Amino acid sequence: MTNTSTRNKVLWAVATVLVLLYALFPVASILATSFKSPSDLTSGKFLPSSGTATTSNYEQILVGDAQGLFLSALRNSIGISLIATFIAVVLATLCAYAIARLDFPGKKLILTTALAVSIFPVISIVTPLFNLWRSIGLYDTWLGLIIPYLSLTLPISIWTLAAFFRQIPWELEQAAQVDGATTWQAFRKAIVPLALPGVFTTAIIAFFIAWNDFVYGISLTSTEAARPVPAALAFFTGASQFESPTGAISAAAIIVTIPVVLLVLLFQRQIVSGLTSGAVKG
Amino acid sequence: MTSAIPAKTTTASPAEAGPRLDAGRGNGTKTGRAPKQYSDRTRAERRLGWILAGPAFVIMLLVTLYPILQAIYESLFRFRLTAPDERAFIGLENYLVILSDPVWWSGLWTTVFITVVTVLVELVLGFALALVMHKALKSVRGLLRTAILVPYGIITVVSAFAWFYAFDINSGYVNSWFAWLPGIDENLNWFAQGGTALFVIMASEIWKTTPFISLLLLAGLAQVPDELSEAAKVDGATWWEQMRKVIIPNMKAAIMVAVLFRALDAFRIFDNVFIMTNGAYGTEVLSLLAYRQSISRLEIGLGSAVSVLLFLCVLLICFVAIKLFKVDLAGTQGGR
């Protein structure tokens, strides 16, 4: 008996370590690369050689010659993603509230449209937008990315929030009214606290998706005015033609990964329930 | 508070949910609301519904329907941004040019190959991860779920660089680590030939997106009633029999949704290919072909036609999935 349980424990420990390795190894890999000195980059080793680990890559992108490029991209990414997330979540909250709470024709149409938009190949949208944006002056502007980002963030926000809102016992609102609260008080005190976690979770998921965009980023921007981080990373060419930007790109990659990892650490439970309730349970 | 309404009721069809809410509120005297004419109230509710949901709906149409219509229109013209004066209506000629070009077909097969392989691997790997998370001890469950979310949250481009640098002939360590394997040595340039380049591209794609499939499958696992597998165990079924006869059939819906979503996503693969090979050595996928035609070469007419064809492919996948495999998206997604 103790034998099998010991064996079981070992098996589970191994499984846990394997999952952790799977999830974290590529991150560790680029983290190690980001601390390598230029001469050490070709060593063929995973870790920086002893004594040569350096923070010069981070200095280069944060205070050095690549600073302008990276920091403006970071500013663009944060600003554009946050605004696109905010607009999507506000609109999706109204929409999902109506879907969960009110009875009106066309609900199915709205949800089907959201589904259709989310499976739309981004590249099919980008060609006509590229053309249009150039003629109306939205090319290489924040707004020129915020609008197409809504095609990424709105559908998932509507699905996720509609799923959340359906789980809210709306009867609570009436119960509060029976107890003497006004309509607004009842809504604010009974419903808002239940709805807020869902809205917040949706915002995180929408933000991840906007933050991850690459196709719009490289197609609809051309300068530091609006180019977001993923696109900037792809076009980053290093100080000179002969110097490979491996270290700098790795350092930049680690910096843009930190907020993601923090969000995941803090809101792991909510993100899982948001992702799965929107897609499976409904 | 929330426990007053069991989670299961939320899966109730909208048709049931609507009238139920209605019934509660229509009974004005009980809820203390001013009693109104039913038809008036219904009309007001319908109007409010569209006022609240309308903006999101209109924006979704504007950001997708309009561009795709525009793309269909542009695809009928010979139109290059570098030579705007030569713009001329040519009907379906762009489509003929593309469909008779081997570049399109090799792009299509590469894309299909990547889609099939990554989805199959992700399904197996994702299921294994889901099983581990499902059965894991309470003490490590949170840790595992947090770890598994890291790849989900990471930018695809960052994942692409991480895998690229690991395998790269200059900065990589994979060659020296696995030199003992036949076919791998210090001089293996993974990105100089289609097969090995595709391998790394797919590995990166799989790493980044398996967590999503895995979480969907975990949710599916959680919905399989415990009594079923208990009963099977009592009847002496082996682990494999339990899986095959009880667990998997009961989570078929979750599996189908996960597969369809991932397949559609994989079919649009772009970031990994762009970073690692930029389409060289037979790794060009359809998204990259569309990008190259319109954004790099400014061939708006041809690029639009590729975009429309790509869109049609995605529609076809959906159609096949829904008809052939009976994926009930509306049903499993709790849609109305």
Image (cartoon, coloured by chain):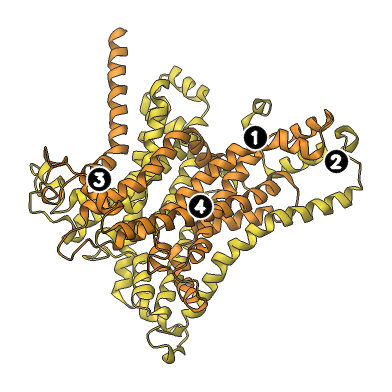
Chain colours: A orange, B yellow
Q: CA distance from mark 3 to mark 1?
A: 40 Å
The residue drawn where x is 36% and y is 35% is B147
The residue drawn where x is 42% and y is 50% is B262
- Number of other residues with Cα within 10 Å of mark 3, as a class: few under 14, some 14 to 19, many 20 or more: many
Give the x, y percent position of residue A241: 17, 66
Q: What residue did someone put label 4 on?
A: A82
Rendered view: A37 above or below B31: below
- Residue type marked 1: Leu
Indicate which label's residue lies in the foreground, 3 or 4: 4
Q: What residue did someone put label 3 on?
A: A30
Give the x, y percent position of residue A79: 48, 55
- Residue type marked 4: Leu
Residue A230 is labelled as: none
Q: CA distance from mark 3 to mark 4?
A: 26 Å
Whether labels 4 and 2 belong to a single chain: the reply is no
Secondary structure under the numbered disc 1 in the rendered image: helix
Q: What residue did someone put label 2 on?
A: B26
Q: What residue did someone put label 1 on?
A: A194
**Image marks 2 and 1: residues in contact by CB distance under 8 Å:** no
- Number of other residues with Cα within 10 Å of mark 1, as a class: few under 14, some 14 to 19, many 20 or more: some
Q: Is residue B61 visible?
A: yes
Q: Is residue A192 left or right of residue B146?
A: right
Give the x, y percent position of residue B168: 17, 53
